[in-house]
Amino acid sequence: MDSPNPKKRKFGFTDRPPTETQDSTTTLSSDKTNENFKKEVLNDESSPDINRWTNAPYSSRYYRLLEDRKKLPAWTARRNFIKLVKRNQVLVLVGETGSGKTTQMTQFALEAGLSGMRPIAITQPRRVAAMSVATRVAEEMDVELGVTVGYSIRFEDKYCDKTLLKFMTDGMLLKEITTDRTLSNYGMVVLDEAHERTIATDVLFGLFKDLIKLRPDLKLVIMSATLEAKKFQEYFGGCDILRVPGSMHPVEIFYTVEPERDYFEASVRTVVNIHMAEPEGDILLFLTGEEEIENARKEIEAMLSRKNCKDPITILPLYSSLPPSQQQRVFQSVEGRKVVIATNIAETSITIDGIVYVIDPGFSKQKIYNPRGRIESLLVSPISKASAQQRAGRAGRTRPGKCFRLYTEAAFNKDLVAETYPEILRSNIASVVLSLKKMGIDDLVHFDFMDPPAPETMMRALEELNYLKALDDEGELTTTGSLMAEFPLEPQLSKVLVEANEHSAALELLIIVAMLSCGNVFLRPREAAREADLAKSQFSAPEGDHLTLLNAFNSYRSVPQSSARRYCQDNFLNPRSLSSAVNIYDQLHKIMAKHNLLAPAASSAPAISYNSAPAGLPGSRGAHRDINLERVRRALVTGFFQQVAYRSVRGHYLLVKDNQSVALHPSSTLQHSPQWVIYHEFIHTSKNYIRTVSDIKGEWLIEIAPHYFSTEDMPNGEVKSALVNLYRSRRS
């Protein structure tokens, strides 16, 4: 590695010696003279020219990809992998980022018949990874995606009865196991990226600990990119560990001399400086979410334009709500330099070749839950040391690279925790509890969690489900709870859909739930904020944001498909989110129809569109509109009565139960300050906000959920006084 040169000084980084290259002594060897093994293993030199999965000759692309595969450390480890899986029911595989473990090991297992030629399920913590890995494996096997290789993610799948390698999110496998406790269709399960410790993965750990006793023929492989694998090994009774080294070049680490005041501005500046001053090589920038990523793309383009930079550059976003076609662009070659701006999905879940420069601001969005206040929110939080190391490793895949950390070395050493806390320790687990109850697992206190959630978190989850009438007072699953568990949604939303038909508003509520599940719909770029606000106002409903979402959906659907993208562009709507909402609506509609939750006329009738301004949107007015609006909002209360705020005499809002002061989010379309509101999200930034808010009547609360709005246990204050008055008015 060359010593740091003055060019690096202009970025404001101190120098650090390059990291050591991977010790070659840890590389696993294979005996390539074993002819029997050659016949078992995928695509060995002795394999015929006919693809066994399609009965057609292999394409030229197959042979080109085969040469790339042979260079991966995982290829060298295949003999050891097959031998250990045959010998053990459970195997932990530690594969460094870039080793090829995700794409190769499942192919080896399939070709060697380790699953008994039954399908193999492979879980990923993120939707993007499940789709992109499935696409890559299908290309390497020279098969059509959706046949031999497929995927299944929430509200979207691409597989058939012939699928043998099925990539899916861990949440989808958890959904499957609720209906088939023994996973009888599968011969092998691979839990990939297990080190990320999502809630679904942790629950699957506990379920598989019992399942492997019931299914001695089922093979389980747990793959991790970190040394936490030792913990996995102990949890599963001391099973074998196979270590596969990565293919790493040295990575030079740079830190800032002083802390950065604005990591976003520093990120944009660093991308521009690298592009204008550093040799060729692609750039990977980590940011925290879709809005930040899209804003950064525009800021980088604007800054390069101001500096009159003509060097070719392609800036590509990568986040979970991107459609598959756009996600795949990050893997394709471009003219000039490629800049990928990604969430932490790019830490370990996917590998992008050609990355030489990594920019790490040191933050990610993490779910945080306060069980006492029953408040869950996404907060921009510092990453862990383990995440920082994973990010740096992205720069050394194809040649020596550089990682620019936009924080000081002292901050790395003193402020960052060693590992990211498991999601189950910092999340609301009501959905998990509902799923476990659906499976008939009632003794949740003794469920074998690898890291048990706090008792208070468990009690709050049980209490929340009891309030929603998903569990009875004995903690048993009710008929309502059983129906709620059929939906891949948070309990509040599933309760709304279960109750929707009782309020004669099923289709409207289906649309609203789909819109709440599809990501950000309204775009508000910095350079056109005023125009975006004006465009949004044409969809605004005076009753609040839920009806505004309904208006936007119906307006989008009224436009011919050929004009939809242009319509979205003109009205600052997110076409990806709206397209996703349409798909989610269709999927939820099928679930409701299957369980007889729709009135006969609702199976094909279009939803009504409500608009408050003469902006050319289809809609109805007058008494008919008011009646239907009330039905929709009352139905929303059946799921969200635990997320209610009351307007104080001082003008701000107070959360019911704990009197916490909050403000309506600036993005809300509410055109007045109602006395009572329901909200979908609690957001903590510079202050506490509630987002996606609608006006409701206080009387609905004590009619729909008197069991929750008992004033006996409430602290004295304005909220309690208001509820007491509501009860008095009702009795009089």
Image (cartoon, rainbow, N blue to C red):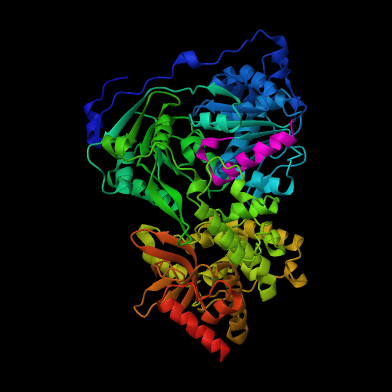
Asked whether 203 falls inside the magenta stretch, the response is yes
Residue ID at (29%, 32%): 254
For this view, does 159 lie left or right of residue 386? Answer: right
Residue 439 place in picture, x, y as percent:
70, 50
Residue 641 place in picture, x, y as percent:
54, 70
Image-quadrant location for residue 533: bottom left
Q: Quadrant of the C terminus?
A: bottom right
Q: Is residue 126 above or below residue 104?
A: below
Q: Is residue 320 above or below residue 705?
A: above
Magenta extent: 192-216
Asked whether 112 falls inside the magenta stretch, the response is no
For this view, does 382 lie left or right of residue 101? Answer: left
* Front in this rendered view, residue 662 or 579: 662
* Front in this rendered view, residue 441 or 522: 441
Report the magenta stretch's main SS.
helix
Q: Quadrant of the N terminus?
A: top left
* Front in this rendered view, residue 285 or 82: 82
For this view, does 325 lie left or right of residue 214? Answer: left
